[in-house]
Image (cartoon, rainbow, N blue to C red):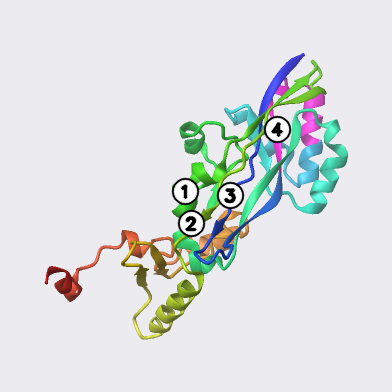
Amino acid sequence: NKFIFSNIKAERGVIYDSNLKQLVFNNSAFDLLCDKRDLAVLSKDITKEIEDVAKIIGKDPEILKKEIGEEKDSQVLVAENIPHQMLLTLETKIKDFPGFEIDRNTTREYVDGYFFSHSIGYMSKVNKEDLASYRDYSVSDYIGKTGVEKFYEKVLRGNPGKTEIEKNVSGNKKGEKIVSLPESGKSLVLYIDAGLQKTLTEVLESRLEMPNLRRAAAVAIDPRTGGILALVSLPSFDNNILSGGGTVSDLQKIQNDSAQPFFNRVISGQYPTGSTIKPFIA
C-alpha cells in the first residue's frame, strides 16, 4: 500500500468596486489529471487505460501517451474545463482508470471584463515557472497573472487543505482522510467606481473615432487618498478570454493586434510631461 497527499483547493476571494458591486465571480470547473505514480510501468493494461481515456476526451492515444511519458512532474494535466457531457461519461468510468482522477477546480468570471481588464487583470493555469516559484500549487491550479489578481494572489487564494489517499498495489483507492481543511481566500474592495470606469472608457472611445487615433489612456485619482477611482487603457481586451472563456482564435486576435491591447498605457507608457507639470511646479 502507499499514501498519496494532494491539495484541497480553497475558495478564492472575489473582488468588488467601491460601491460593493461584485466585479468577479467564481465558477466551478473540472479537469482530468493523470498521476504517473499509478502508471509507473507501461503494461498492456495501462496502455489500454490510456487508449480508453483518449477515446473519451477525443485525443490521439499515441499523443496522450507521449505527453504523459515526457512530463517530468508526477501529475499531468490531461484535459481542462471538461465539457458537461464528457464529464458525465468520465464520472461513470473513472473507477476503471486508476491512474486518472477528476479534479474540481474554479475559474473566474469577470463582469464587464473589457472595462476592467487592465486593473483587475486575469488568471490562467500555472506554468512550469510558477510551479518552481510557488509552493502548494499543482498542475491544475490557476494563478493571478496580471493586475490585482497577481498583486493580491496570496490574499485572494487562501490556504489549500491536505488530503491523504491510501491505494493498494493495483492502484485502487482503499481509504481517504482529510489531514487539514482549506482556508478560503479574502475578498477585496477596490477604490474603483465601476460607473465612472465605464463612463471614462466610453468618453475615450468616442475620441478614438477621430482619424489616426487608436490608443488612449486616462486615470482618475482621489486627491485626498490617492485611491484610483478609474483606470482606462485603450484598446482593451476581455480578460475572460485568458481565464478559459475564449478560443485560440480569440487569443491570437488580441496578440496580433498592432495596437497592443495587453499593454497598460496608464502604468507602463512613457509620455512627455507637457504643460500639465506647470501647476505642480508653481
Dots 1, 2 in contact, CB < 8 A: yes
Quarter holding the C terminus is bottom left
Residue labelled with disc 4? 34
The secondary structure type at the circle numbered 3 is loop
Q: In the orientation shown, which residue stands out farthest toward the left?
A: 282
107 horizontally vs 149: left or right? right
As drawn, which residue projects farthest toward the top? Answer: 1
Decide which of tag 1 and tag 3 comes sooner along the chain.
Answer: 3
Which quarter of the figure has residue 41?
top right
Q: Is residue 265 above or below residue 96?
A: below
Q: Earlier in the sequence, mark 4 or mark 3?
A: 3
Residue 168 percent coordinates (x, y): 80, 17
Label 4 to label 3: alpha-carbon separation: 28 Å
- As drawn, the label of residue 121 is 2
Is 35 magenta? The answer is yes
Asked if disc 4 and disc 1 are in contact, CB closer than 8 Å, the reply is: no
Task: Compute the Cα span from label 4 to label 1.
Answer: 28 Å
Q: Position of residue 66 (x, y in %)?
A: 65, 33
Q: Which residue lies at the image location 46% right of the left edge and 79% below the top edge?
A: 202
Q: Are marks 3 and 2 in contact (CB under 8 Å)?
A: no
Q: Specify whether residue 90 is painted magenta.
A: no
State the extent of the magenta-drawn residues as a range: 31-51
Estimate the spatial distance between the alpha carbons at disc 2 and disc 4, rounded to whole Å: 30 Å
Q: Secondary structure at mark 4?
A: strand
Q: Which residue is mark 1?
A: 150
Task: Kindly identify which residue carries mark 3.
Answer: 13
> Given this view, does label 3 or label 2 mark the residue nearer the observer?
3
Percent position (x, y) of residue 192?
45, 65
Q: Amino acid at mark 1?
A: Lys
